[in-house]
């Protein structure tokens, strides 16, 4: 494919000692030569590929020196975009970097759109769509594990599995065609229906397996959404501070201190948590507090894990019981805090209400029980079969939605084989499944969607 030559600042703006302006396209080298001057008067056009050169950038009309630089020369196709790439390493700093960008634009490059370098890598066939999306995920990864998932996807693991499934569907379709073309061999239905059923069932199972990982993929990417709830003043904000080892949330002895949701990312024994501190849940007349309580109820519904905090020095209240009830059936750890104070809580009563849920006692004030709590969280996570390092995780929302669709259409095809529907009708569902899976890797995806996906990237990537 032939493209124009694009340029962008590929490093964070105004940060770091060195910044890179990247050029990609057929004119990348000649544009660089217009503004680059080396002490030995060499021209990049004459130099070997994958070499780096010291020199200065000048305004071509006046030869005025603008910057001292190192220039990397990389000729396609062995580059990120498969095109000729030139990277200008200049001194970091907003003004100089922008001047360099202006120079290359004036010399004939076009300002790249967000994600356009990666888009070219995709359009030139170096990576497929799910790999390109993984590049984006990698940039945004908030946890170590998320990074591993993205790297796994970038190396094409998901793509290969999807293509294997599509291949199986394609072979089935081809077989049906053969049988329709030569009906004299045998009864078409008898030949093809069992084949469709067999391959269809296998594809469906594989899709289901992928979907099972999607929940874990989301957690690995975004952190286990962990919500701290409980009555006012039981020590929720203290717990958050203790887990993140920082005084982030305001702690006072006034009930109703936390009015809004506080979110923090933290790694607890290798488990990525998105910790959410909430306003203590109680009936209240205070309007600000009431909004906070309403929000607490909302985030509770979306939680992967709930840390339900109670007070060792007070008897179970109506509200405690209501919370135990409300979190029934959700992954919950019950924390009884303030064990340094005299006991008033009836543990037998609590155990009765808690059912099989784990109970951990703490005194956050005296830093007791936090280790045990962290252990419980890790146990829950890893015993839930979360770690499996080499699994193919699906974590991208677009991929998950498409997998759900594909599962439905292949199920439709399978149902149809049971209902005596004509083979050419079933073929439509099988073909549709093949197309939907193709959208994941970008084989059968619409151009407008491609534009939209790449537009979500950062500038310069
Ligand atoms: N300076 C710089 N660092 C960077 C990038 C970049 O574009 N520039 N990358 C941008 O994201 C990442 C590296 N990604 C890259 C991926 C593939 C190729 C590449 O040349 N691939 C060739 C094979 C090269 C060979 O075998 O020698 C190919 O696939 O054909 C280059 C960079 C991270 N670091
Ligand atoms: N004695 C004792 N006091 C504690 C303990 N943990 C927290 N506190 C105190 O309890 C009070 C309330 O703590 P917070 O963390 O603000 O409680 P909260 O649940 O966030 O309260 P709201 O935001 O108002 O719902 C503060 O004075 C804390 O210092 C503990 O283990 N023992
Ligand atoms: Mg609080």
Image: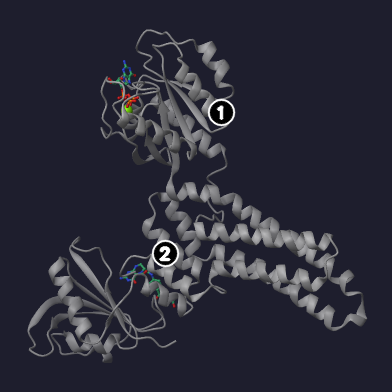
Q: Is residue 175 above or below residue 410?
A: below
Which of the labelled discs sits on residue 328, or is there none? 1
> Residue 109, image x and y in percent?
26, 84
Residue 134 vs residue 260, the one in the foreground: 260
Residue under the image location 49 percent in, 37 percent down: 301
On the picture, is 193 further left or further right than 55? right
Q: Quadrant of the N terminus?
A: bottom left
Q: Give the residue displayed 44% in from the left and 41% down from the top.
A: 225
Please identify the quarter of the rendering in which residue 309 is found: top left
Left or right relative to 354: residue 284: left
- Return the x and y of residue 384 as percentages of the image width and height: 57, 39
> In what element is the residue under mark 2?
helix
Q: Which mark is residue 135?
A: 2
Residue at image position (52%, 74%) is: 446
Q: Residue at x 35, y 34 (%)?
A: 291
The residue carrying mark 1 has its beta carbon less than 8 Å from ligand 2? no
Estimate how packed mark 1 is, as few (under 14), some (14 to 19) or many (20 or more) residues with alpha carbons within 10 Å. some
Q: Residue 62's mark? A: none
Q: Residues within 10 Å of mark 2 (few under 14, many from 20)?
A: many
Which callout, 2 or 1, points at the residue further toward the start of the chain?
Answer: 2
Quadrant position of ligand 2 = top left
């Amino acid at each position: 494919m032939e493209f124009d030559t694009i340029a962008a600042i590929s490093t964070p703006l105004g940060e770091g000692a060195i910044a890179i302006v990247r050029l990609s396209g057929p004119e990348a080298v000649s544009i660089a030569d217009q503004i680059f001057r080396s002490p030995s008067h060499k021209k990049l056009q004459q130099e070997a590929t994958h070499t780096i050169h010291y020199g200065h950038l000048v305004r071509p009309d006046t030869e005025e020196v603008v910057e001292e630089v190192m220039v990397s020369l990389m000729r396609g196709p062995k580059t990120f975009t498969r095109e000729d790439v030139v990277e200008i390493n200049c001194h970091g700093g907003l003004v100089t970097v922008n001047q360099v960008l202006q120079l290359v634009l004036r010399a004939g490059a076009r300002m790249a759109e967000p994600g356009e370098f990666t888009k070219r890598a995709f359009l030139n066939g170096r990576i497929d769509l799910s790999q390109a999306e993984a590049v984006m995920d990698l940039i945004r990864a908030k946890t170590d594990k998320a990074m591993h998932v993205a790297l796994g996807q970038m190396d094409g693991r998901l793509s290969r599995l999807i293509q294997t499934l599509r291949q199986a569907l394609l072979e089935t379709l081809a077989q049906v065609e053969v049988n329709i073309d030569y009906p004299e061999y045998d009864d078409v239905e008898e030949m093809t229906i069992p084949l469709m059923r067999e391959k269809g069932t296998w594809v469906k199972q594989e899709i289901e397996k992928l979907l099972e990982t999607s929940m874990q993929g989301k957690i690995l990417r975004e952190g286990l959404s962990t919500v701290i709830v409980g009555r006012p003043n039981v020590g929720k904000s203290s717990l958050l501070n203790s887990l993140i080892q920082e005084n982030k949330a305001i702690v006072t002895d006034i009930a109703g201190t936390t009015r809004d949701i506080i979110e923090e990312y933290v790694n607890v024994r290798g488990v990525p948590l998105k910790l959410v501190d909430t306003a203590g849940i109680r009936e209240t007349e205070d309007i600000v507090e009431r909004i906070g309580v309403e929000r607490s109820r909302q985030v509770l519904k979306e939680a992967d894990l709930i840390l339900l905090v109670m007070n060792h020095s007070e008897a179970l209240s109506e509200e405690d019981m209501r919370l135990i009830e409300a979190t029934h059936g959700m992954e919950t750890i019950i924390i009884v805090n303030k064990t340094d104070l005299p006991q008033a809580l009836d543990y037998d009563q609590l155990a009765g209400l808690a059912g099989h849920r784990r109970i951990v006692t703490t005194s956050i004030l005296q830093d007791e029980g936090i280790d045990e709590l962290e252990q419980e969280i890790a146990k829950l996570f890893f015993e839930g079969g979360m770690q499996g390092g080499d699994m193919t995780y699906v974590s991208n929302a677009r991929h998950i939605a498409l997998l759900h669709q594909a599962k439905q259409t292949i199920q439709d095809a399978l149902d149809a084989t049971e209902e005596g529907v004509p083979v050419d009708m079933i073929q439509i569902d099988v073909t549709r499944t093949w197309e939907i899976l193709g959208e994941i890797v970008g084989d059968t995806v619409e151009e407008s969607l491609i534009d939209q996906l790449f537009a979500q990237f950062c500038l310069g990537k």
